[in-house]
């Protein structure tokens, strides 16, 4: 019996391909979904379960381009308008532009976010992000905080207050 190393390599390569190709296809197809993902409707929830509190989260609105996604923002505003009183809207940071000393634009961006939540019945919270901390001190955060205090809108605030760390916040008995 003559051992042919080239023939043996070809056989091993073909065997490896015949195993690898279906395996890779199986992994890729298992990650795909062909059905639209939507929130559960109230009919699927059991009668004894009630939502104790709702959170609405938006972020990076200060980074938006001149062509913001108005359809998405309009839809978000509709949801906020229907939100219950036991809810919180959290703007998770980058609420202002990344450009330093650009308060004219920054105040307009904060105003647009306030307009989004004009009819929101719950609490609105602004958290600082990279754009707010960009000055490496509290200047930008305090400007946003002072602006919101001047507007004096009920249930709207900046957390952390004066740049101090957040220890914890009690929402209700469950949160």
Image (tube, grey):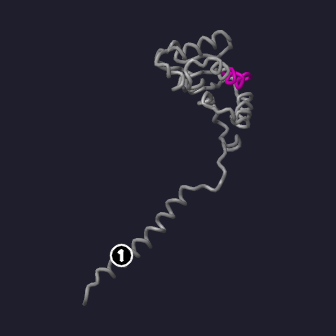
On-image quarter of the N terminus: bottom left
**Residue 118 screen position, x and y as percent:** 73, 21
State the residue in front, 63 or 27: 63
Out of 132 and 103, give the one closest to the viewer: 103
Residue 27 image offset from top left, x and y in percent: 49, 60
For this orientation, the residue located farthest to the bottom is 1
Q: Which residue is rendered at x = 46% and y = 19% of the image?
A: 136
The part of the image, by quadrant, that contains residue 35 is bottom right
Name the quadrant of the C terminus: top right
From what the image shows, is residue 170 above or below residue 14?
above
Return the residue nearer the eye: 171 or 156.
156
Q: Is residue 97 visible?
A: yes
Which residue is painted at 65% across and 18% down in the image? 104
> Can residue 57 be spotted in the picture?
no
Q: Please, what secondary structure does the residue beneath circle 1 have?
A: helix
Q: Along the horizontal axis of the image, is 25 left or right of 152?
A: left
Task: Please provide percent x and percent y for residue 57.
Answer: 61, 30
Residue name at image x 55 percent, y 26 percent: 174
Horizontally, is 175 left or right of 118 in the view? left
Q: Depth check: 92 or 60 in front?
A: 60
Q: Is residue 120 magenta?
A: yes
Local packing at callout 1 (Cα closer than 10 Å; few below 14, some 14-19, many 20+) is few
Q: Is residue 121 above or below residue 143?
A: below
Q: Which residue is mark 1?
A: 12
Look at the image and say whether residue 92 sits in the magenta stretch: no
Q: Which residues are drawn in magenta?
A: 111-122
State which quadrant residue 60 falls in. top right
How many numbered dots are placed on residues in this image? Answer: 1
Residue 134 position within the rendered picture, expressed as x and y whole percent measured from the top left = 50, 22
């Amino acid at each position: 019996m003559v051992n042919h190393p080239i023939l043996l390599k070809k056989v091993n390569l073909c065997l490896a391909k015949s195993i690898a190709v279906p395996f890779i296809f199986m992994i890729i197809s298992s990650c795909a979904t062909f059905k639209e993902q939507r929130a559960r409707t109230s009919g699927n929830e059991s009668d004894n379960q009630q939502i104790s509190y709702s959170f609405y989260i938006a972020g990076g609105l200060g980074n938006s381009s001149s062509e913001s996604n108005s359809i998405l923002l309009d839809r978000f505003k509709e949801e906020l308008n229907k939100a219950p009183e036991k809810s919180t809207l959290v703007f998770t940071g980058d609420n202002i532009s990344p450009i330093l000393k650009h308060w004219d634009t920054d105040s307009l961006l904060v105003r647009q976010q306030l307009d989004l939540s004009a009819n929101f019945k719950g609490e609105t919270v602004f958290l600082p992000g990279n754009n707010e901390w960009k000055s490496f001190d509290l200047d930008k955060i305090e400007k946003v905080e002072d602006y919101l205090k001047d507007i004096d809108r009920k249930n709207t605030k900046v957390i952390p207050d004066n740049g101090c760390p957040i220890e914890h916040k009690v929402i209700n008995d469950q949160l």
